[in-house]
Amino acid sequence: MTRSPAFEIFRYTVILLALSVTLIPTLWMTSMAFKPIPEWSASGADLTWWPNEPTLDNFRFIFGESSSELIVALDRTAGKPILASLLSAVFGTLIAMISGTSAAYGLSRFGAGQSLPLALTQLRLFPPLAVMIPVMIMWAFLGLTDTWWGLALVYGIVTLPFAFWLMKTFFDDMPYEIEEAALVEGCSRFRVFMRVTLPMMRAPLASSALFVFILNWSDYLIALLLTTREWVTIPVYMASLSSSMTGQLYGAKAALGLIAAVPPVILGIAIQRHLVRGLTFGALKQ
Amino acid sequence: MVVVDAAGGGGRQDEESRRLGFALTVPAQMLVLFIAAFPLLMQAYISLTDWSPLDGIGWWRAWELWNGFANYSDLATDNRFWGALGRTIIVMAICVPAEFLLGFGLAILFTGNFVGRRFFYSVLLMPMMVVPAVAGYMFFMLFQSGGPVNDILSAIIGSPVQIAWLSDPDLALFAVIASDIWQWTPLMFLILLAGLLGVPEDQLKAATLLGASWWQRFVTIVLPRMKTIIVIALAIRVIENFKVFDTFYIMTGGGPGVATETISIFIYKVTTQELVWGYVAAIGLTILIVLSVVAGVAIKYMSAQRREA
């Protein structure tokens, strides 16, 4: 819009200010993750913004190496929680993408499943806590509590609306002529879907799957309710990293937080173009 | 916008496509049914009893603890519930407008080209991609009495500041609100910028030639064009903010006392600490019904508006 030098100065000032507010919390955690124990507990005067003696001890500690400076030892390492987060998020993404993509195609091309858009939008609207009592009872009954596959099933259902809406908008955008040509050549409709449509949709499928994966990976509440010990995910495990003797294990938590935070940020930047579409249920495209 | 596309992308409706269409939607329908129909009936049933998982009897025998609508009348007089609801609304009334204004302001600055635009854009979006539980932990560390927030304040004021943000009932709410604004302003920014970029350049140019000021162009061309997008952005944040749990719970656990106990934290605590699941089921069902009514009215209102437009 306006292009006076004063405006440019104003623009950069505000953006740089926003940039520092954005970065400070992240940088603080990153710095904390590489701090040795004496630098953890900052009491006012000796707060260090950057580690004086950077170390990988925090990462070694959460993966089970005992530390000479910490009296506590972990009764379990971060390995299994990371595995739990990965397995539940990946398989939850598969469930959501397979059922969501096929339903989106069924609705977009054949007008099947008219009730799905409303039902899935409602699913997105409700706070999970308002419906968790029956889920917890059912999961306990089916032996799904505290398993990664039980968690994956809930994730698949919770993120199904996103997979469905994303893929529906992609299918709606896709020209029908190409499929029609294949139909004329005598392919069955199912074959056209599998052999023509899906391969053409490789890029949208990939971005939708990554989007859904980020959502699953970010969950804390559902894992908190449905896992207890064996298959706790990273955030649940992270919250348990404190002891009565040492209090908060700041550095260890920060190290784990960094491990949890990096994948979604990288994936999110990779699919930046489709974020708006995903977040607004396809109402808005970029 | 929720568009129910009835006709589909254009297909001849023969027997084969009808059958395939049905088959393709079955998995999704089953999942919805699995999470909706049976659990809701179960929830309604349990909400009419005093059942708790500690009772040692299966949930199907909960009728032995039948108490009619006692849970619902308890809810009406439960001060902790109404307190949590009120707090949730206060948080929403501060967070959503703040995120909207900050996000919109930033989005306006990002129209037009300037050096570093792409880089700044990517970095500014980052907070919304951070796992909320991790963001909660980041802010937990920031607001420690010996943490960076006090350090920065000390540097500004010139004398040491030692505020115990998270254990002071008045300040804790401020701290959790700050974390929400940090994490979700980028979402407003992202959506509103996409909307701003969709405003036709030539209309703005024409208005400029006619001598319209920046403000006039903004009010008469940009805002009316952005109406739907603004409603969507606000709706998303209102819905998500109402559910807020992860960051708040990790920062304060709802405390000190109940100072930061929002509706989700309240339900979580009653579920896991007091274990009165019959009561929790009643709370959940009430929230579901109220939200459904609100959403129904909102959708009706919006589609009526659209018809008029």
Image (cartoon, coloured by chain):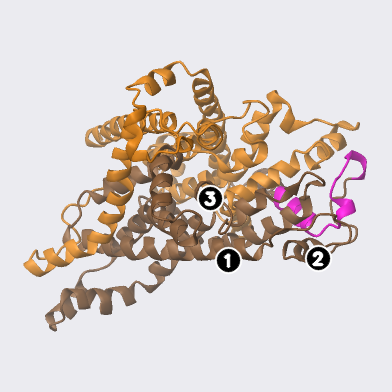
Chain colours: A brown, B orange
Q: Is the residue A69 above or below the residue B234 in the image?
A: below
Mark 1 or mark 2: name the one nearer the start of the chain. 2
Asked if marks 1 and 2 fall on the same chain, the answer is yes
Label 1: how many Cα within 10 Å (few below 14, some 14–19, many 20+): some
Q: Which mark is in front, 1 or 3?
A: 1
In which image quadrant can residue B281 be found? top left
Specify whether residue A29 is painted magenta: yes
Amino acid carrying mark 3 in the image: Thr
Q: Name the residue under label 1.
A: A83
Magenta residue span: A25-46
Asked if the residue under mark 2 is in contact with the one under mark 3, i.e. CB atoms within 8 Å, the reply is no
Give me the residue at 42% from left, 54% from top. Answer: A154
Tell me the distance, in whole angstroms, between the alpha carbons under discs 1 and 3: 42 Å
Picture quarter with the C terminus of chain B = top left
Label 1 is found on which chain of the structure? A
User: How far across and how far down the image is residue A184, in percent?
Assistant: 12, 80
User: How far across and how far down the image is residue B264, in percent?
Assistant: 51, 35
Instruction: Answer with left or right where residue B11 lies relative to residue A213.
Output: left
Q: Can residue B298 be seen in this view?
A: no
Asked if marks 3 and 2 fall on the same chain, the answer is no
Q: Which mark is in front, 1 or 2?
A: 1
Amino acid carrying mark 1 in the image: Leu
Q: Nearer the viewer, residue B90 or A55?
A: A55
Label 3: how many Cα within 10 Å (few below 14, some 14–19, many 20+): some
Picture quarter with the N terminus of chain B = top left
Q: Residue A56 carries which label?
A: 2
Q: Mark 3 points at which residue?
A: B111
Prevailing secondary structure class for the magenta stretch in the rendered image: helix
Label 2 is found on which chain of the structure? A
Q: What element carries label 3?
A: loop
